[in-house]
Amino acid sequence: MSDLKKEALSLHTAASGLRGTGHHTAKPLQEFKAASHDLSALGALGSLLGAKGEIEKGMTTLAKLTQDLHEEWEAEAKFMGEVSDAFDLLDVLLAAAGKSGKKG
């Protein structure tokens, strides 16, 4: 297996892994978002400290950042897939050029 083929396979595998992160984190993220609106676990402590609004705001910000990160990972996975495809094509072209060079 050529080096380009190995790199293409490695990039393809990494891209597949990145694409899967959203699947693995979707349910926890949804639960986290829901919990940001129900902070009853803080009880009187949250009310006494006046922190409930700040905690909700912080949790909403974290959820938004996580969504942004998923979008970035998806874009990175797409790019890695395209580079992998380019390496595959380059490998085929180099092999073909090598074969035609041996004939002449």
Image: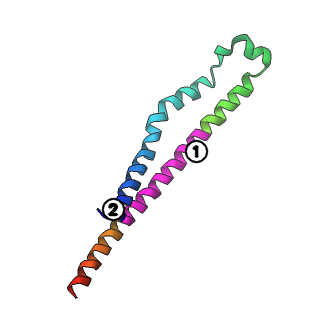
| Quadrant of the frame with the C terminus | bottom left
Identify the residue at horizontal 54%, vertical 49% (top origin).
72
Span of residues in magenta: 65-87
Image spot of residue 94 (x, y percent): 32, 74
What's the distance in space between the residues labelled 2 and 1, CA to CA?
Answer: 32 Å
- Quarter residue 24 falls in: top left
Position above or below: 30 against 100: above
The outermost residue toward the top is: 44
Q: Nearer the viewer, residue 10 or 25?
A: 10
Check disc 1 and report its element: helix, strand or loop. helix
The residue carrying mark 2 is 5
The total number of labels drawn is 2
Image spot of residue 12 (x, y percent): 38, 54
- Quarter residue 103 falls in: bottom left
**Residue 25 in the figure: left or right of residue 46:** left
Identify the residue at horizontal 79%, vertical 14% (top origin).
48
Q: Nearer the viewer, residue 26 or 80?
A: 80
Front: mark 2 or 1: 2
The residue carrying mark 1 is 68
- Hey, what amino acid is under mark 2? Lys
Badge 1 crowding class, 10 Å Cα cut-off, few under 14, some 14 to 19, many 20 or more, is: few
Image spot of residue 51 (x, y percent): 76, 22
Check disc 2 and report its element: helix, strand or loop. helix
- Hey, what amino acid is under mark 1? Asp
